[in-house]
Amino acid sequence: MAGVRTQYARSGDADIAYRVYGEGPTDVVLVYDWGSHIEAVAEQPLFDEFVQSLARFARVLWFDMGGIGMSRSVVGGISPVESWVHDLTGVMDAVGSSEAAVVAQGQAVQMAVVAAATHPERVTSLVLLNGFARFARADDYPAGLPERTQEVYRQRIELEWGTGAFAALLGPSVADRAGVVEWWGRVERYGATPGLARARLDSILELDVRDVLPLVDVPTLVIHNRGNDFVRIGHGRYLAEHIRDARLIERDSADHWPLPEPGLLGAIEEFVTGSRSDVHDVDRFLATVLFVDVVGSTEQVSEVGDRSWRVTLDRFEETSRRVLSLYGGELEDVIGDGVLATFDGPARAIRCAWHIRDEVRRLGLEIRTGVHAGEVSRRSDSIAGIAVHIGARVAALASPGEVLATRTVRDLVAGSGIVFEERGEHALKGVPDRWALYAATS
């Protein structure tokens, strides 16, 4: 969802970073594990797709707990779990949310169960993903991490923090994909220094909320991956056994990260809303993705005012819709000051982009355009997939009036008469590898 920005809510003396996705009838608060950084995590298309999928049936309030990622307290250091509960209610208050389901992963599960026990009037239900009530082993808790493994993790943090090496443990099914290790290294570096990361691990090993579990009296779904070597299945089974009437789903996966898998997303939707739509039944197909963005919209709003700018944007949208229909394009979404469309062929997408550019210049507008061809996922009312992210990143690199395309597009339109000028290789934020880009000229 282009245009989503990070905001801050006040929680005592802490500034809590949060984002809001979607406008659904139900509020869902999403909180990830302690190794988080809301903006760096959002760069990864897999995580972005997970959040966007939740936002198709709910308004999602995603935040970093105090002392983690982009959220900081005045005194710094590690926040107690009670402070994290205040962070949750502070974010809800900031957006006018009176009650919400809480989807928590990893250590955030400890915060979530305390929040549900202390604020049942605000937490309507819990979805606990690969989490735990206690992380360290004890005589009465054999599921916990033994001392020798604790020391191994401490040493690995000292030696490997910031390299992304932990991706192989946290997301083994995707860690070998190009760019994932490098991306996770950025998340680690942005989120904490090695010393702070080790302090967080020590704090986690001390925290125990098992006594709170019997006090949780809201509907609870525990989802845990059987092959998860970081937080083993025994943790999830313990949660389900000690929270009244909790339901347990054990999944055949080795990942600790929640990835955008239809079965997982469908289970969450059904539990939170009471029904499961067909939105997670993914229909994958090849499409040409066209992104069109208006250039300099902020400056123009300042010049003409909000009302006049809204009229201009309405005319831009009407023009885009009309021209798209001439070239067989399908409007998928109107995003901020731009549009997303798909075509079954890249040559028509490029010619359509030229036509839109020439038409909106009569309105006094300039646009930049990105074109990419690849596999997308058709959902109920939109499209998703890495091809969509690539198209958006390419559009952001285009100059005013330029139709910028990937090599895939250039190769597919060979013989069409469209001429391309090289624009060099570029790194696309959140997308693996470097990409050769070309300006399409008539």
Image (cartoon, rainbow, N blue to C red):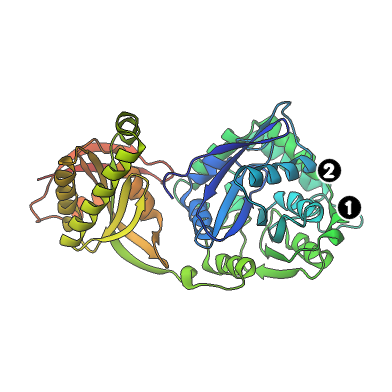
Name the residue located 75 percent from the left edge and 45 percent from the top edge. 85
Name the residue located 85 percent from the left edge and 55 percent from the top edge. 212
Q: For this view, does 437 lie left or right of residue 87?
A: left
Task: Report the disc number at residue 37.
Answer: none
Q: For this view, does 358 lie left or right of residue 181?
A: left
Q: For this view, does 170 lie left or right of residue 390?
A: right
Q: Looking at the image, which is closer to me, 279 or 141?
A: 279
Sequence order check: which comes first, mark 1 or mark 2? 1
* Location of residue 267 by image quarter: bottom right
Q: Amino acid at mark 2?
A: Glu
Q: Which residue is mark 2?
A: 206
Q: Quadrant of the C terminus?
A: top left
Spatial distance from mark 1 to mark 2, Cα to Cα?
11 Å
Rendered location of residue 164, percent (x, y): 56, 41
Q: Is residue 327 visible?
A: no
Q: Looking at the image, which is closer to me, 150 or 191?
A: 191
Q: For this view, does 182 lie left or right of residue 202?
A: left
Q: Is residue 102 above or below residue 379?
A: above
Q: Is residue 43 above or below residue 130?
A: above
Q: Is residue 422 visible?
A: yes
Query: Badge 2 local density, few (<14 within 10 Å), some, or many (20+)?
Result: few
Q: Which residue is mark 1?
A: 138
Rendered location of residue 416, percent (x, y): 10, 56
Q: Looking at the image, which is closer to me, 81 or 94?
A: 94
Q: Amino acid at mark 1?
A: Ala
Q: Secondary structure at mark 1?
A: loop
Q: Secondary structure at mark 2?
A: helix
Query: Badge 1 local density, few (<14 within 10 Å), some, or many (20+)?
Result: few
* Tally of marks: 2
